């Protein structure tokens, strides 16, 4: 298949935007090579975009290179947005990891790299900023091995570095590649390798041959017979190793100087998989209640995953979809399998860098935008009634931080609620609720930055001016022991008897298990509604614990007795008994307050290490490891989120702005007594 669905992964500042811009520029050019006038137009467009400071506003952008359609799925780099990263990783088949030749493998790149490992995504790497002072190609390769446990296989070598960076050696073609500063680097000039570089180039070539022959007897024999291998055989074996996650081909360049981007596109096509070359994904057949494997299949009934919603005030909601089997067509109705509701697709679009293109259908493997979907949320599957399969659900982390938000004018209150509903539909890690006591709206999410971005969107994109409170940690509640309790509810309401007696057994579950509900009562006389009312009473009560009203987690409930009297037992009484019963049982089961503990990664110049570790310890943190990398120390720690507010500011002042810091949710633990 002449298609690639790729993501570009990078930590902040590695040059993702610059590289993507160059990709769109060169591919836009080559795609329209036929028309004479286009050069300046494309150039103008690029300048305009640069002036506005945005390029990729779309979650997926399509471009063409060497007769291949490349869909670039936007992959955010900041760890506060891991959910965004996860959801984009779900739909891409391969990725380009960009590293900065000076900064190397930073904590954030590690996080994203490990997520890509989890999703078994084949990768190639691009070491950017070779022109910057301190650029060191070999050091980044070394870090990829030691920090990412990757197998980097350079297919290029830089010619010079820092201000002397002049181009790259294509190790396999055994040529030098050069770009002319004039003309925006459109032309790649190939030249024989100069005398002075021939030894290093040969050595790199030999090393590459070692890699490609190491896993293939056939290639080893051919090499022994012929004394060399054909470039296409080397590429094919490198592709096989990349798809098997046994190798990461590495290229380099300086995107800002227009050096290195075209060979990177060649490598995307050479080494990364097409949609029909990726392993099957899991699905759950709703009617059969069975797991199924979903293979790429153009003829099967349609299955598409909604992986991102983007709302534009004028254009409405864009639902970005990836089609896995069959096709989806404009003007047709489909079923949202998760919600069991019919949805109509009015229009389908393919997004390009500077325009969108209306299409009649999107086929298996393709990525595009559906317009018209009303109920579908990020993570939902669109399919047909006859083939109700839910595609592998995405796992989103729990929100750990919340703030109160209040519109400056009362008139904006309803509007704010609408916006919050819309934003939480777009982003499955963003929640909102109305506080019962204060009437304030409370929004919650994954970190301070996540909520900052949301508040900015509410203000700037939707024009609602709002005041916000201080960030608060979202705690959880659980139990520390088992307990058995019987709750009797017996009240006359409106002249009618309401009686129920429910016996429940509680046990603490291990962290991360969630809550479970089981009912072991078997009594033919008890109607279904009664069982449902009991379950509702209990699951409803999970949402607010007895200590401070935070959600309960990791509690196992078994209902072992329901006393039922056909004359006196009502669903109302059962629900009430179950709900109060759970609260009372929890009181007897050693209720606990749990708090979010974050994994913290800090990189600082060695001279600040003592102060930084002191600061971490003062915030209740536990240092788990310290690794030195040259003059930089990499400190990993865990610490309670409540102690980390404002940490980035404090790190900046301790390290004169030279420390970098990333954090993500790790687990919930019992809140310590220290405050
Ligand atoms: N010297 C040099 N600077 C570069 C190169 N590529 C990008 N930059 C600069 O590095 C900075 C960050 O580049 P971006 O492309 O915005 O990086 P990004 O990874 O998208 O960063 P965020 O948007 O912050 O996530 C900008 O000032 C770029 O001009 C390069 O090849 N060489």
Image (spheres, helix red, strand yellow):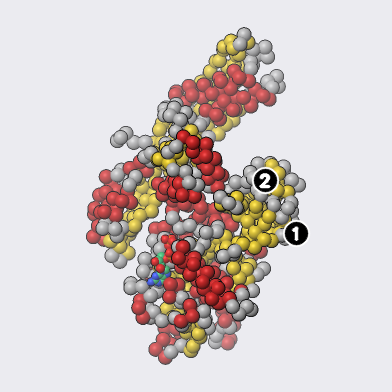
- Work out whether residue 21 can be spotted: yes
Relative to residue 235, is residue 47 drawn left or right? Answer: left
Q: Relative to residue 301, is residue 10 depicted above or below?
A: below
Quarter of the picture containing the C terminus is: top left
**Cα–Cα span, label 2 and label 1:** 20 Å
- Work out whether residue 553 can be spotted: no
Relative to residue 23, is residue 134 drawn left or right? Answer: left
Q: Position of residue 606 (x, y in %)?
A: 26, 61
Classify the position of ligand 1 by quadrant: top left, top right, bottom left or bottom right: bottom left
Front residue (pair 588, 594): 594
Quarter of the picture containing the N terminus is: bottom right
Front residue (pair 171, 21): 21
Identify residue for label 2.
Answer: 336
Nearer-N-terminus badge (2/1): 1
Q: Relative to residue 162, is residue 454 depicted above or below?
A: above
Can you tell which quarter of the image residue 366 is in? Answer: bottom right
């Amino acid at each position: 298949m002449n298609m690639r669905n790729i993501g570009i992964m990078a930590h902040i500042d590695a040059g993702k935007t610059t590289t993507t811009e160059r990709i769109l520029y060169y591919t836009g050019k080559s795609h329209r090579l036929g028309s004479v006038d286009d050069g300046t137009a494309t150039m103008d467009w690029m300048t305009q975009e640069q002036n506005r400071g945005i390029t990729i506003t779309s979650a997926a952008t399509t471009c063409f290179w060497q007769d291949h359609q490349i869909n670039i799925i936007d992959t955010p780099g900041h760890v506060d947005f891991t959910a965004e990263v996860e959801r984009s990783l779900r739909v891409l088949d391969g990725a380009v990891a960009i590293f900065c030749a000076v900064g190397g493998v930073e904590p954030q790149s590690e996080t994203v790299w490990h997520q890509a490992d989890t999703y078994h995504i084949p990768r190639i790497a691009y070491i950017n900023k070779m022109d910057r002072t301190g650029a060191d190609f070999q050091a980044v390769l070394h870090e990829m091995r030691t920090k990412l446990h990757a197998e980097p296989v350079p297919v290029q070598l830089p010619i010079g570095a820092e201000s002397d960076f002049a181009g790259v050696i294509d190790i396999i073609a055994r040529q030098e590649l050069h770009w002319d500063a004039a003309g925006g680097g459109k032309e790649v000039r190939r030249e024989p390798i100069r005398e002075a570089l021939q030894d290093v180039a040969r050595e790199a070539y030999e090393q590459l041959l070692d890699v490609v022959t190491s896993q293939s007897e056939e290639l080893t024999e051919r090499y022994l017979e012929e004394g060399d291998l054909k470039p296409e055989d080397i590429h094919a074996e490198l592709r096989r190793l990349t798809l098997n996650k046994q190798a990461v081909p590495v290229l380099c360049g300086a995107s800002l100087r227009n050096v290195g981007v075209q060979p990177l596109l060649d490598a995307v096509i050479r080494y990364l998989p097409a949609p029909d070359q990726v392993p099957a994904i899991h699905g759950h057949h709703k009617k059969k209640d069975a797991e199924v494997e979903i293979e790429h299949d153009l003829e099967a009934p349609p299955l598409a995953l909604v992986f991102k919603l983007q709302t534009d005030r004028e254009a409405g909601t864009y639902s970005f979809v990836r089609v896995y089997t069959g096709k989806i067509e404009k003007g047709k109705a489909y079923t949202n399998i998760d919600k069991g509701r019919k949805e109509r697709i009015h229009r389908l679009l393919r997004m390009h860098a500077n325009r969108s293109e209306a299409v009649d259908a999107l086929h298996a493997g393709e990525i595009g935008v559906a317009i018209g979907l009303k109920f579908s949320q990020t993570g939902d599957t669109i399919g047909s009634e006859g083939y109700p399969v839910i595609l592998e659900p995405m796992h989103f982390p729990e929100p750990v931080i919340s703030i109160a938000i209040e519109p400056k004018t009362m008139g904006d209150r309803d509007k704010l609620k609408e916006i919050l509903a819309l934003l939480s539909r777009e982003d499955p890690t963003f929640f909102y609720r109305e506080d019962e006591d204060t009437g304030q709206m409370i929004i919650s999410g994954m970190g301070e930055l996540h909520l900052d971005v949301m508040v900015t969107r509410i203000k700037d994109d939707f024009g609602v001016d709002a005041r916000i409170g201080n960030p608060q940690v979202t705690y959880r509640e659980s139990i520390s022991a088992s307990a058995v309790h019987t709750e009797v509810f017996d009240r006359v309401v409106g002249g009618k008897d309401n009686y129920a007696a429910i016996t429940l057994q509680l046990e603490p579950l291990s962290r991360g298990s969630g809550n479970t509900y089981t009912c072991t009562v078997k009594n033919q006389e008890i109607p279904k509604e009664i069982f449902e009312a009991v379950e509702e009473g209990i699951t409803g009560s999970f949402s607010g614990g007895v200590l401070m009203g935070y959600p309960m987690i990791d509690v196992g409930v078994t209902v072992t007795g329901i006393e039922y009297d056909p004359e006196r037992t009502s669903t109302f009484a059962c629900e009430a008994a179950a709900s109060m019963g759970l609260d009372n049982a929890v009181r007897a089961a050693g209720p606990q307050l749990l708090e979010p503990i974050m994994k913290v990664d800090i990189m600082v110049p060695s001279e600040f290490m003592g102060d930084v570790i002191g600061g971490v310890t003062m915030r209740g943190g536990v240092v788990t490891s310290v690794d030195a990398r040259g003059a930089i120390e990499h400190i990993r720690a865990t610490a309670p989120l409540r102690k980390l507010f404002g940490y980035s500011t404090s790190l900046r002042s301790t390290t004169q702005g030279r420390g970098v810091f990333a954090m993500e949710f790790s687990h919930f633990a019992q809140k310590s007594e220290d405050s």
